[in-house]
Image (cartoon, helix red, strand yellow):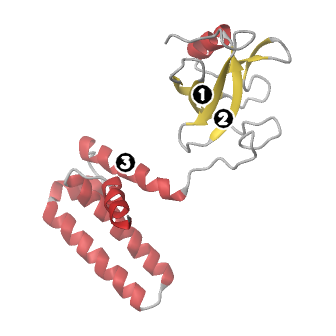
């Protein structure tokens, strides 16, 4: 990657640090070429400290390292976006981010993780897995399970049993994702369809 270290005084590039899982921006630091090369070789985010005038690997004192997942340069090659898996809080104040935000996965994003898990099951087909058994049994069994879970969801809704409603609706959603995966679709395809209708 060709980077332009000449735009800022001291040969520094801004490095935006983003959590690879949650998508939250965690902090901003600066790298010179040496810090960038150390980050590449160690797979741990290393900055050039402007106050100490030396290299500084994030977490070298606290143990809260930033494990590099990917590095991208912007269109001008003078700013970095570094996706990481953080170990512990990022800010020196003890907060998850330098803006005080909580760094956690929004619950709705778990549906994507579940879809990824089900897609992986479809490829690997491990023995003893319930999901594998659904794929092995074929579309009739999957469609039957979606129907059964839909009926059970309706029954619990009519009975005003909110705890069971959420339980059965979760079963319904899981089996629907399996059916979608079998047909080559993902939960995001439903989101796109609903988004299109919403316009």
Residue 182: percent from left, percent from top: 21, 54
Res. 87 mark: 2
Q: Is residue 126 left or right of residue 70?
A: left
Res. 110 mark: none
* Residue displayed at 71% across by 41% down: 97
* Residue assigned mark 3: 117
* Residue displayed at 76% across by 44% down: 95
Q: Nearer the viewer, residue 130 or 82?
A: 82
Placement of 54 over or under 130, stated as above or below = above
Q: Residues within 10 Å of mark 3 (few under 14, many from 20)?
A: few
Q: Is residue 170 left or right of residue 101?
A: left
| Distance CA(mark 2)–CA(mark 1) | 8 Å
Q: Is residue 80 left or right of residue 158?
A: right
* Residue displayed at 62% across by 14% down: 36
Which secondary structure lies at badge 3? Answer: helix
| Distance CA(mark 2)–CA(mark 3) | 24 Å
Residue 69: percent from left, percent from top: 52, 28
Q: Residues within 10 Å of mark 2 (few under 14, many from 20)?
A: few
Q: Quadrant of residue 55?
A: top right
Which secondary structure lies at badge 2? Answer: loop
Residue 196: percent from left, percent from top: 33, 61
Residue placed furthest toward the right: 51
Residue 125: percent from left, percent from top: 25, 45
First in sequence: mark 2 vs mark 3: 2
Q: Is residue 116 left or right of residue 138?
A: right
- Marks 2 and 1: CB-CB under 8 Å? yes
First in sequence: mark 2 vs mark 1: 1
* Number of numbered discs visible in the structure rendering: 3
Which secondary structure lies at badge 1? Answer: strand
* Residue assigned mark 1: 67
* Residue displayed at 58% across by 31% down: 84
């Amino acid at each position: 990657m060709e980077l332009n270290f000449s735009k800022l005084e001291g040969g520094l590039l801004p490095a935006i640090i983003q959590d690879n899982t949650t998508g939250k921006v965690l902090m901003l630091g600066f790298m010179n070429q040496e810090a960038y090369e150390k980050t590449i070789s160690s797979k741990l985010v290393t900055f050039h400290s402007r106050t100490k005038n030396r290299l500084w690997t994030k977490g070298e004192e606290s143990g809260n390292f930033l494990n590099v997942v990917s590095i991208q340069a912007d269109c001008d090659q003078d700013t970095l976006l570094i996706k990481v898996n953080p170990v512990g809080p990022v800010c020196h104040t003890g907060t998850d981010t330098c803006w005080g935000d909580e760094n956690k996965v929004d619950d709705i994003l778990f549906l994507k993780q579940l879809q990824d898990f089900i897609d992986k099951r479809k490829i690997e087909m491990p023995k003893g897995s319930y999901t594998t058994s659904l794929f092995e049994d074929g579309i009739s069994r999957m469609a039957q399970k979606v129907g059964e879970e839909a009926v059970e969801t309706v029954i619990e809704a009519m009975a005003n049993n909110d705890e069971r409603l959420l339980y059965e609706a979760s079963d319904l959603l899981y089996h629907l994702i399996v059916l979608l995966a079998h047909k080559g679709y993902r939960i995001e395809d439903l989101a796109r369809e609903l988004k299109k209708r919403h316009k």
